[in-house]
Each structure stands twice: as C-alpha cells, then as structure tokens.
Image: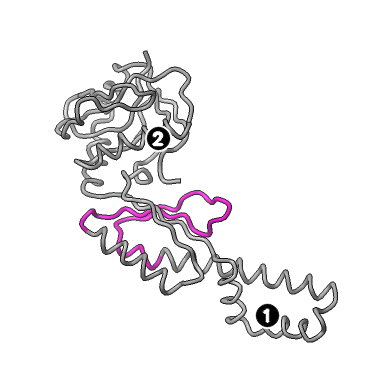
Amino acid sequence: MSTYVYGITAASHPALPDGTTGVGEQPVRVLKEGDLAAVVSDAPEGLRPKRRELLAHQTVLGDIAAVGCVLPMRFGSVAPDDRTVTGVLAERVDHYKERLRALDGRVEYNVKATHVEEAVLHHVMAGNPELRAFAEANRRAGGGSYEDKIRLGEMVAAAVRAQEAEDATRLESALESTGDAVSVGPESTGWLANLSFLVDRDAAAEFLEAVDDVRKSLPHLEVRVNGPLPPYSFVEPGPAEPAGTRAGVDAGAG
C-alpha cells in the first residue's frame, strides 16, 4: 500500500498520542532513519482534497508542531511505500537537518488584506485633490456627461489600484521587522496582499500586536491572520519533498 507523508521531523521528536489518525482515518505512525523521522500513514484509496481530509492533514501537522519542529508536506504527498520514504530521508539527510535547525522554534503566520470598499473610496478621494475636484464638478453638472462619468470611474479605479500597491508595501514593511522571514503568496482574487511570516514562537505576541497596529493605522484595510501554523511557506520546494511523492492541494494557509 502507498504511504501518505505528513511531515519530516528529528528522530528524537516526541511521539504523537496513541490512536492518532490522519487522512481517511488511517492510523498515524513514524518511520525513522538515522537522525530523521517521517510521520506517515497508509494512503487511503481515492483520496480527494475534501474539507474533512484537509482538516485531518492539518490537524496531524498541528499536533506534531505543537511539541517540536516539523517540515510539513503538502496535502496529497504520497510515496509508493515506506522504503521509498526512508530512502529519501537517508539520501537528503543533510538538507532536512539544516531545514529543521533553521525552522526550530518558529511558526508561520499568514496575513491577507483587502480593502473595505466604502472606506478606501473615502481614503483615495481625501488624498487626491484632482479626483475630488473632478467628482465635484460632475456633481454640480448633475452627474456630468456620459464621457465624464466614464472618466471619473476610470480615475477612481486607477486610484484604488495604486492604493492597493501602496498598502501592500506598507503592510509588509510594518510586519517584516517582527518576523525572521517573509514569503509572498500567490495572487488571488479579492486580496491585495497574501503574505506569510516566519515568526519566533516567543515573539508571536509582538507580531500580533504589530498586526493590530496596522489595523489601527490603516482602517481602510481588512486584515486577516491565520496562525500559528507549521512553516509551510518556508520549506523549499523540490528537495524538501520526498522523491516519488505526488503533491496535491497545498494544505498551507490559503
């Protein structure tokens, strides 16, 4: 049977409680190879990224991360068998040990931001005299001509896009000093920023306080935080995933 891989830890990592189950309600077990270990289970047939299975994957990783460092695998990482997994641990021992040392004592916080529509419109109007004057001229003209309405709409849209870029930069600058590293996530509809921060566990309160400060200083932003999480965004792709695995949906903060 194929082997489902949740993450890689040091062989000395504390054991999970007896009876821990993962995807497909399969019992979770540990494969050790020298100084390293992989937390795995049998891979259920027909695995799909359904909410229940995604949560099971994340729960196992959360339990592992709660008591020590883990290099998390993406949802759907499956190897042909246990021997393949231990073979990769032996082959890439130096890489994995370096990553475990680098990420020890650190967690990930994912921060997403979007504009509060009404608030950002007020914000860009207040900060743009030309836009404000044109809108006022249209208002006095009973709304203005069709062409003037189109132009006003284009001006507002351009001002909001510029504000999105500015706010994304300000958000990252305000938070990066409280983290050890930052990773820019893929662009997605509806978010002007999708950032993941690597944060020392002992500095988590300081980081969250910095997020609150951003909310106060940029009230036209809606800022959402997900964490603490295992450091999904800071395990390099390629060498950090067992050869022979097939990666499905990323179980990281999305």
Q: Position of residue 106 (x, y in %)?
A: 25, 50
Q: Is residue 249 left or right of residue 3?
A: right
Q: Residue at x 40, y 25 (%)?
A: 245
The quarter of the picture where residue 152 lies is: bottom right
The outermost residue toward the top is 1
Q: Position of residue 194 (x, y in %)?
A: 47, 54
Residue 7: give its label.
none
Residue at numbered disc 2? 74
The quarter of the picture where residue 225 lies is: bottom left
N-terminal-most mark, 1 or 2: 2
Q: Position of residue 139 (x, y in %)?
A: 76, 83
Measured along the vertical axis of the image, is residue 171 above or below residue 188?
below
Residue at numbered disc 1? 131
- Count residues near mark 2 (Cα–Cα under 10 Å), then give few for <14, some for 14-19, many for 20+: many
**204 part of magenta stretch:** no
Q: Residue at x 28, y 21 (%)?
A: 87
- SS at badge 1: helix
Residue closest to the eye, 242 or 146: 146
Residue closest to the eye, 46 or 157: 46
**Real-space Cα separation, disc 1 to disc 2, in angstroms:** 46 Å
Q: Which residues are magenta?
A: 173-202
**177 part of magenta stretch:** yes
- Count residues near mark 1 (Cα–Cα under 10 Å), then give few for <14, some for 14-19, many for 20+: some
Q: Position of residue 246 (x, y in %)?
A: 44, 26
Q: Is residue 31 left or right of residue 135?
A: left
Q: Residue at x 32, y 36 (%)?
A: 59
Q: Indicate the amino acid at tag 1.
A: Leu
